[in-house]
Image: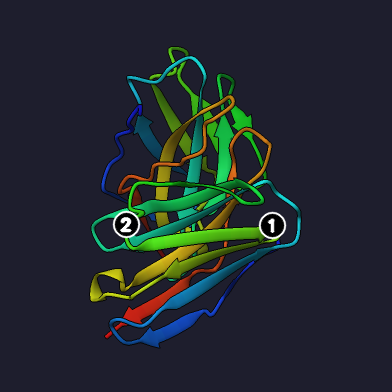
């Protein structure tokens, strides 16, 4: 357990509304990640952060933005949610030990 | 990115050993071999990783071929709780590396 929590754990929203998911860690790891998981696609990287205010895009970043104003929190924002963003979202941190990542419990998002 | 090949599914009887294979013929000299697993409705969970030598921990053992083109995750005594999707992932070490690329993995079923 790497002290990772995600909130909310479940959310239902409507198309066009903004949504923010929060990932919180308690161990001051530098690297944090947001993935989404969909049937048939496995986990895909959305964005990642390598420090406060330092972020970069992953494989499926369109329609998402992120922010990291302090080490412990990494926020994922859907500016205008679409049905294609219905998914399970996982946050992860990377330890310095040889690239190992630890994942949060996930957020299930349903966009109607 | 170097890719891995795993069987789609495997079955094991409870309390018997399980050997989960992974081929990674294009592995580079600095790639770590990671194994993660994902239980139903949970986030991925780190299992074990290694570079060249065989590795053991409380969850499993990792056997790495001498040429590093394949590896085997060994669960010494399968329990019902080990039923999960197992992912074999290569992760380049060094500055700038950041992403775990998840394939489809091997779905392990454990028969009581």
Residue B14 falls left or right of residue B94: left
Label 2 CA crowd tier, 10 Å (few <14, some 14–19, many 20+): few
Residue for point 44% across, 71% down = B41
Report which residue position mark 1 lands on. Answer: A2
Residue B90 falls left or right of residue B93: left
Viewer-closest of B87 and A51: A51
Disc 1: which chain?
Answer: A
Which is in the foreground here, disc 2 or disc 1?
A: 2
**Dots 2 and 1 on the same chain:** yes
Residue A60 falls left or right of residue B57: left
Q: Work out whether mark 2 precedes mark 1 in sequence or the reverse, and give the earlier one.
A: 1
Residue for point 32% across, 57% down = A62
State whether residue B60 appears in this view.
Answer: no
* Residue farthest toward the right in the current orientation of the protein: A27
Question: In the figure, residue A23 lies in which quadrant?
Answer: bottom right
Report which residue position mark 2 lands on. Answer: A62
| Residue B90 image point, x, y percent | 44, 32
Residue for point 55% across, 19% down = B52
| Residue B2 image point, x, y percent | 35, 27
Disc 2: which chain?
Answer: A
| Residue A69 image point, x, y percent | 66, 60
Q: Quadrant of the N terminus of chain B?
A: top left
Viewer-closest of B35 and B26: B26
Q: Quadrant of the C terminus of chain B?
A: bottom left
Cα–Cα gap, marks 2 and 1:
28 Å
């Amino acid at each position: 357990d790497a002290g990772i929590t995600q909130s909310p754990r479940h959310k239902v929203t409507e198309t066009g509304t903004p949504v923010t998911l929060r990932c919180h860690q308690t161990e001051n790891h530098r690297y944090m990640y947001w993935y989404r998981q969909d049937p048939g696609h496995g986990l895909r990287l959305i964005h990642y952060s390598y420090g406060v205010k330092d972020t970069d895009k992953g494989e499926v970043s369109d329609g998402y933005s992120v922010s990291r104003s302090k080490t412990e929190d990494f926020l994922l924002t859907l500016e205008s949610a679409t049905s294609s963003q219905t998914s399970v979202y996982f946050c992860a941190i990377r330890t310095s030990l040889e690239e190992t990542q630890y994942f949060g419990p996930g957020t299930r998002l349903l966009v109607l | 990115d170097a890719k891995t090949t795993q069987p789609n599914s495997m079955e094991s009887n409870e309390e018997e050993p399980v050997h989960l294979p992974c081929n990674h013929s294009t592995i580079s000299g600095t790639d770590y071999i990671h194994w993660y697993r994902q239980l139903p409705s949970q986030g991925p969970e780190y299992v074990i990783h290694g570079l060249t030598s065989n590795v053991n921990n409380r969850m499993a053992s990792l056997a790495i071929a001498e040429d590093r083109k394949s590896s085997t995750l060994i669960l010494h005594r399968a329990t019902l709780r080990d039923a999960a999707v197992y992912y074999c992932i290569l992760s380049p070490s060094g500055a700038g590396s950041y992403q775990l690329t998840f394939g489809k993995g091997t779905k392990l079923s454990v028969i009581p």
